[in-house]
Image: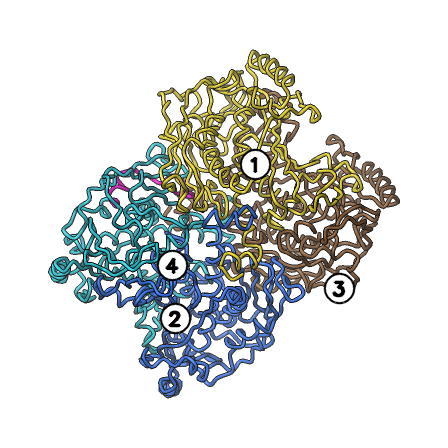
Chain colours: A blue, B cyan, C yellow, D brown
Amino acid sequence: MSGSVYGNIFKISTWGESHGKGLGVVIDGCPAGIPIDSDDIQRDMDRRKPGTGKYATKRSEGDKVEILSGVFEGKTTGTPISLAIFNEDQRSRDYSAICDIFRPGHADFGFESKYGFRDYRGGGRSSGRETSGRVAAGAVAKKLLAEIGVEVNAFTVAVNDIVVDEKRFDFAERLNNQFYMPDKEAAQRAAALLDDAMANKDSVGGIIQCEVTGLKPGIGEPVFDKLDASVAKGIMSIGAVKGIEFGAGFEAARMYGSDNNDNFYISEGKVRKYTNNSGGVLGGMSDGDKLVFRAAFKPTPSIAQSQITVNNRGENVTVEISGRHDPIIIPRAVVVVEAMTAVTLADLILMDMCARIDNVKKLYGKV
Amino acid sequence: MSGSVYGNIFKISTWGESHGKGLGVVIDGCPAGIPIDSDDIQRDMDRRKPGTGKYATKRSEGDKVEILSGVFEGKTTGTPISLAIFNEDQRSRDYSAICDIFRPGHADFGFESKYGFRDYRGGGRSSGRETSGRVAAGAVAKKLLAEIGVEVNAFTVAVNDIVVDEKRFDFAERLNNQFYMPDKEAAQRAAALLDDAMANKDSVGGIIQCEVTGLKPGIGEPVFDKLDASVAKGIMSIGAVKGIEFGAGFEAARMYGSDNNDNFYISEGKVRKYTNNSGGVLGGMSDGDKLVFRAAFKPTPSIAQSQITVNNRGENVTVEISGRHDPIIIPRAVVVVEAMTAVTLADLILMDMCARIDNVKKLYGKV
Amino acid sequence: MSGSVYGNIFKISTWGESHGKGLGVVIDGCPAGIPIDSDDIQRDMDRRKPGTGKYATKRSEGDKVEILSGVFEGKTTGTPISLAIFNEDQRSRDYSAICDIFRPGHADFGFESKYGFRDYRGGGRSSGRETSGRVAAGAVAKKLLAEIGVEVNAFTVAVNDIVVDEKRFDFAERLNNQFYMPDKEAAQRAAALLDDAMANKDSVGGIIQCEVTGLKPGIGEPVFDKLDASVAKGIMSIGAVKGIEFGAGFEAARMYGSDNNDNFYISEGKVRKYTNNSGGVLGGMSDGDKLVFRAAFKPTPSIAQSQITVNNRGENVTVEISGRHDPIIIPRAVVVVEAMTAVTLADLILMDMCARIDNVKKLYGKV
Amino acid sequence: MSGSVYGNIFKISTWGESHGKGLGVVIDGCPAGIPIDSDDIQRDMDRRKPGTGKYATKRSEGDKVEILSGVFEGKTTGTPISLAIFNEDQRSRDYSAICDIFRPGHADFGFESKYGFRDYRGGGRSSGRETSGRVAAGAVAKKLLAEIGVEVNAFTVAVNDIVVDEKRFDFAERLNNQFYMPDKEAAQRAAALLDDAMANKDSVGGIIQCEVTGLKPGIGEPVFDKLDASVAKGIMSIGAVKGIEFGAGFEAARMYGSDNNDNFYISEGKVRKYTNNSGGVLGGMSDGDKLVFRAAFKPTPSIAQSQITVNNRGENVTVEISGRHDPIIIPRAVVVVEAMTAVTLADLILMDMCARIDNVKKLYGKV
């Protein structure tokens, strides 16, 4: 229970360190019969891959995913799907400058406090590279969701103080700029802001929004395994996320009930809502509307400026972090947000199948 | 897996509906030897109890907790602790006005979609009364935490647009007003705002902050069971919570790395930080600093105004919700936030014991 | 994780000690819509109840079960079902004779080693009364199974060396004698043997067989959550069980492959087997045949003879256990075996629903 | 939840098919600081490896294990340990003769019933090769156990009707013969019996005994996660196991309480027992004595004789299974029994650490 297993029915177990032999994930509980090939997964891996944009690290990771088990004749077999990404770029580095130092904003101090020592090579298990396994699993979960018409899309709504106005959302545009921003002009301003930050050896944060369509009402388990609670755990488990909000979110705290309540109405025989302050979730279950949430990412903690900190011998020191680091986490995190959302939803959708005896009878052939 | 079991080692299983025979919780995995009596639990139950303030429902719930098992000679035995609160005020009501209606902002539509029908009496399992079991479990978790010097305190930092200025925090004051606000003047303004809202048959939201002291560094499991991710799930599972943020939270998205990083230094042989933008958590593990987070609560969805909605026969209707309803959830939710935090921390602290073979050897008598 | 939670989807959490306020169980994850009332449960509780036969303790436990939550208008709601049995016969006893003694064959030494002290009243949590919660949960699981035509029946095939010949099985008879033996003559011999044992202040063991009909092929999850492995855990978790075997069981170790393999054939379009050495399970999944297993119970450890043992101060002592004790566990354990089997099967059947994407699509309305 | 994840704290997730790219396991929750290198694991892998004895398949699997993550500078880091065995001998075979046939005694029918199709290459996930991941995980668990002086040893006590007399046990001898029998003469008779069986294109079964020393009293969690119940699940999850018994086992059913109860006594200040009918477990917790259990293995279902069976088109057919198959499972299963025992014990020992608040305080530095 070192915390690298996630999910109840659709259960993933990730492994790997930044500079070890590789990284990967084992997915247990994926239903049989889903068509899948490695290209489906590679497509998402490439979105997470560094080195493709100006604001991403230059390391050529390759990130080539291999399916090691669980797929036969192009379909999932129902048995564990093992996916691995072997590290190609393990160039020998000298870590002596930081191996005994607790970098500000990083997990170094926590790791050493918890385990007594740590794998200091490139952050080890706390590296952003840890998300490779998540993205691979997310790609499989998306294939499951696609079978029932559920789609997950994340994009960037803020880079530092450059916030995309919801009225200006241009979804197609999000795929045209390296920030995944649904607003061309905002993306251009973000680029300029990033250039300045990099010149200052600094980094910036931002906000990612995620939307899910196709969810039927009732997904999510009342009380603890609520839809929003479960998604919140998945998203907050991504390094650098400092907050999450659904629908009106923190703004809801300033609203009156008469404004915040989304009124229901019937349209074409379906229950709909006039507004979506709920963000698509009521009482922890999907309400048939679009699921909408936002996650706040802190700026990349690795910066080249000289910083005050301590080492593991209890001494005050300064550190300058060299090497390859993204000045902003957001662009590569978009697909990670999608992945964690997809994995969480796959699990909740499978759980929901067991909610009614009618379902059991239907599948057992008694109805 | 209807979602009413929470935790891995310190595991709670809550039960009960608003207008059934009672509510309760079974705690499995609480260590043996913790001194406890029902007064310890009742104290927190009373903080959740309605009918004590002007801005709380008038129902006299009693909320008298009984310890049914797991405590012997004043100490926990290591076996399941069963706690029950039997409903006293089950006055017969006429639910015909709402039994087939999906109330706006409520879980009614989700429940009926998921299960095919629902217990419509007072919201059934989705009632705020569901939190009774959480609070009872939280009181036990707090006793565990007290044994190792960990303390959990929640209070209100915003009621609608009345926000407490952090510079004015007066912690003692939070226990003197019914909003748990650490600012006497803000509490007075909140009272006036509530009076207006009630006059308008409306409701308001707010923000609760929670702080935990005494956490040693390294609590929280890397990757999925991170400290912040786990707490986020627990808190977001409380009805009406729409967002959560740790430390600088959403503001971190607007900061530069050089400002957001908390610099470490050594003081009296201990690793400390000059600032706490992290909110006490780095890489998903406690960093030795105070754990700080905020949760946004939406306004109470039950309002007496006439609202547009639909019924379960697919018809557009209007509804006026009568009965006893808090115009604001915040005051009674403070102790629920503490409870979910305490339960989550108890679990993570027990998990952390297993992180090092040195610990195993120490307890097995091999060191 | 003191081990009182069982199951993955159909999850039960039992609580209670022999001489505390009561015992019970919370069932989380039971599908909505199953018709149930307390009589359904009471029927099985009565089979476990002591005091009804000559070879059972005289304590009038009552064992009246109450449904505290999760059932509305006669049907399960999908939310936790809380069942409680409050202790009536809490007559004040003097435990000073055994409170510091480790009784041979009992859990006393283990409990004290593990937790540092124990609830010595009537065995506390390790009492046979602990099974009350199991039986109550089992009755609910049986209702679920009944909806899809799955039936669980246990009976006694051996009392000490009196073994029922499979060729003489008379199933109706098992309900006519207090040993649940499907052989009238064997039951009479068992009665005589028990009389002798009681005269000698001694106790005897026996073997219970359990059979399940109506299981469709494919139930059970490959590798670790196999049908037989899961049932084995459930049954071995019943106090006093020392072994379990499926189908040919230990005898299979003496067979040749050509004899042990059950040959398949087609009959009326269905896959059938000529023999059932498998006991209805192949590769950890049901094979469409009757599930058959046997569990060995040791003799009741509480005997009135003087026994050599030790106390918790490290002294050699002798003990004579007075009070009410069954001279044989078997008759009251039959319904407990059924209960654990039913609970385990309910869980595996729900899990199996998620095995194929076709099932997901069917329930999601995409096929 | 296709059932390939096992354990609560020390949690393993195995993957891989017989004729896919490879097999492996991810171990989550292994404490940090345990010295380990791949030789430690390879040693056990080699014991499971086929092709080394006369009564084992001739396939040269290699079974070379690689540590992909979780070990740094020769010690476990506390993060997931990924172990893989890549298949070398993937020689192209023609499966057309059996791809649509349900082999007697095999999981084929169950797999196809459950998932709608199956990976028929060499049994796919239900192949004996699936145990590779278990053995690799077991080797790591044994390293953990070695740190606290716990040792696991399995050996063969019966091959068909050749049963080793407990009085003749010669433990050193078990490593000298290919059956792992602690009796040289019995092993010779077993060899002769196997020669006959092979001549008849037949297979035989047998019984493995496992013993664990060094367990302190109190290991195992009362009620469902009992020591014996947990071990039983692990062992019964090994393909071909049809039964398990602890201590006196099935023989206990024929004993009187006065004989079956193991009397306690004090020796050198320690609680000991005169006999070990309990097999080292009382009330589901270790009693300080040697843990002893036996598992019955059925004969290998793959035999070269012509057998009656059916295909997946519902037709009666005959099948002759060609290829490489062990005429007895036992010799290679010995290390698998040890592995599942070690993995289960590692988990229960970690759980037990959380049983007392004194332990929590000790590790938190409050005592």
Q: Distance of mark 4 from mark 2, alpha carbons?
A: 26 Å
Q: Distance of mark 2 from mark 3, alpha carbons?
A: 48 Å
Q: Position of residue C85 (x, y in %)?
A: 39, 31
Label 4 sits on what residue type? Answer: Ala
Residue occupied by mark 1: C151
Q: Distance of mark 2 from mark 1, alpha carbons?
A: 59 Å
Residue occupied by mark 3: D90
Residues at discs 4 and 2 both on one chain: yes
Tag 3 secondary structure: loop
Q: Is residue A111 left or right of residue D104?
A: left
Which of the 4 quarters of the picture holds residue B251?
bottom left
Q: Is residue D177 left or right of residue C60?
A: right
Q: Is residue A164 above or below residue C87?
A: below
- The residue mark sitting in front, 4 or 2, is 4
- The residue mark sitting in front, 4 or 3, is 4
Kindly identify which numbered label has been placed on residue A105: 2
Chain to which mark 1 belongs: C
Q: Position of residue C268 (x, y in %)?
A: 70, 44
Q: Which residues are magenta?
A: B27-45
Residues at discs 4 and 3 both on one chain: no
Residues at discs 2 and 1 both on one chain: no
